[in-house]
Image (tube, coloured by chain):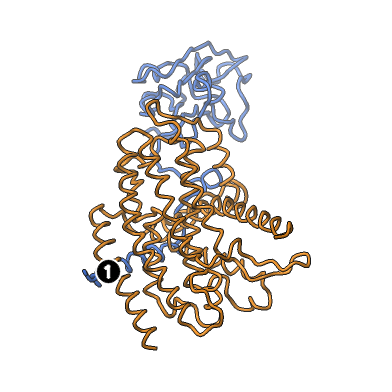
Chain colours: A orange, B blue
Amino acid sequence: MDIALIIEWLIKSVVLLLIGLTGFAYTTLYERRALARIQTRIGPNRAGPEGILQPVADGIKLIFKEELIPDQADKILFVLAPVITVLPALIIWAVIPWGDTVMILGREVSLVLADINVGILYLMAVASIAVYGIVIAGWSSNSKYPLLGGLRSTAQMISYELSLGLAFVVPILIAGAVNVADIDPMSLVDIVRAQRETWWFVFYQPLGFAILMIAGLAEVNRAPFDMPEAEQELVGGYHTEYSGMKFALFFMAEYIKMIAVSAIGATLFLGGYDGPFVGRFPWLGPLYLLIKIAILLFWMIWMRGTLPRFRYDRLMAFGWKILLPLAIVNVFLTAVVIVLL
Amino acid sequence: MQLPDLAKVHEIGRGLWTTFRSMFERPVTIQYPETKKPVKPRFKGRHALKRYENGLEKCIGCSLCAAACPADAIFVEPAENTDEERYSPGERYASTYEINMMRCIFCGFCADACPTEAIVLEDNYELSWSTRNEAIYPREKLLEPVPEGGKPTPQKVEPGAFTRSIPEMEDPV
């Protein structure tokens, strides 16, 4: 392994982190503006032209806030929990391809950090770690509302992870079945390649895509599945006792995961970086992916602006009695159709 | 397996359509410091001390407003007018006129009590201050600007021209 490859990886991961963090900042602005439009308001437009400096102002405000640690809290876990929540949200980006290979300084650079052949398993594994951060935050606060929030979060994320996983199976099945050479159906890069050679998988599997997006909403604790943080019932849920930058980290994790779920949905079903002329101009790839992520993010914001929060038992009933069987039947039918064809 | 109720899915769709449509409506937001919503005709905002057309102050320092004030927010100290230095018609004028805006409840009793209609609750609602002292509005802040054609007070006037505190009204109600 030559040194240039290591430098290339380093640069790519730094760029990814920067994009993730800036993306988080501007997703908050995007959400606030879009929600405001849904409510026929204008939204933040004061800091900088059209409010583009608003995230900076928010960040500065949060940095200067006092960091409180409750007296009875488990100090180490209390400090560790936000970190455990943020890290998976960031490292999930490693396997998402955001473009084809491009030439930079005479080097052929593929626009993905790690093309591992079990990319989807990696996604699922990393996405599941995030729940630990929330549970630990709820428990270490040593306070009843955060604890309840943490418990709800565990139950919810575990329930919906099943449907999410089954929704992931569908693109694997299709990628394995389409007639493209050298496909490794668990690798995200190859799934995108399969979609470029044939059609986007959303045309084969609109139901799978719908299940992915609904379960994804629950996975990142977004409205109408924002049960763990239910402000009105749980005073903010697992992050009630957090303030300042630690609170910002939870916030950051939620938004980066939103972007990540959008990116995964775009990659698995909407062709990833695929788009017109992307073969000739590979730099269009990141742009197409960005547009697709923005559209899927709009879907999440739109759901939040429309639907009220589920009651907890109905949330569980929906997850186990409707979404999971639907996902199982979907996978089963897909498999049967692929075998028959 | 429990099949999703299609009627409910339809309702969710209707809800989504409603919010989507509302994105294209005109925002109801008023960009406050730049555009201001006009107040209602009977709005009671910050007080103003009125002047006559020639620039003389209407207030004669009678302290009836202070007496009427339920919050005890008004302090008036009168002084003698002379024809050399005339502030208002009649014998006296308010040399000190202070309203403590932190006490004022904007009931408008002072305006009702005023015999010369000198104090009026106007439409200014932008009352803010950063110290307690700034909350006490002195007469210089409350007096309205001199109308066009009038002269600022104190004025030097003909002796005997303004002997009545309440001038004869052209059209008494």
Left or right: A141 as drawn, with respect to B91: left
Hey, which residue is sitting farthest left in the picture?
B2
Which residue is situated farthest in the front direction here? A1
Answer above or below: position of B77 versus A90: above
Label 1: which residue?
Answer: A325
| Other-residue count near label 1 (Cα within 10 Å), few / some / many at <14 / 14–19 / ≥20 | some
User: For this view, does A334 lie left or right of residue B79?
Assistant: left
Q: Residue at x 52, y 83 (%)?
A: A198
Q: Residue A139: name its quadrant.
A: top left
Q: Is residue A269 above or below residue B126?
A: below
Question: Depth check: A325 or A217 in front?
Answer: A325
- Which of B109/B164 is in front? B109
Image quadrant assignment for residue A335: bottom left
| SS class, disc 1 | helix
Numbered marks: total: 1
Quadrant (top left, top right, bottom left, bottom right) of the N terminus of chain B = bottom left
The image shows residue A148 at horizontal and vertical percentages of: 30, 42
The residue furthest right is A106
Above or below A202: residue A43 = above
Q: Which amino acid is tagged 1?
A: Pro
Q: Quadrant of the C terminus of chain B?
A: top left
| Residue occupying image coordinates x 40% and y 45% | A134
Horizontal and vertical percent for residue B41?
40, 42
Residue for point 46% across, 26% down: B118
Q: Position of residue A160 (x, y in %)?
A: 34, 59
The one nearer the camera, B131 or A314, is: A314
- Label 1 is found on which chain of the structure? A
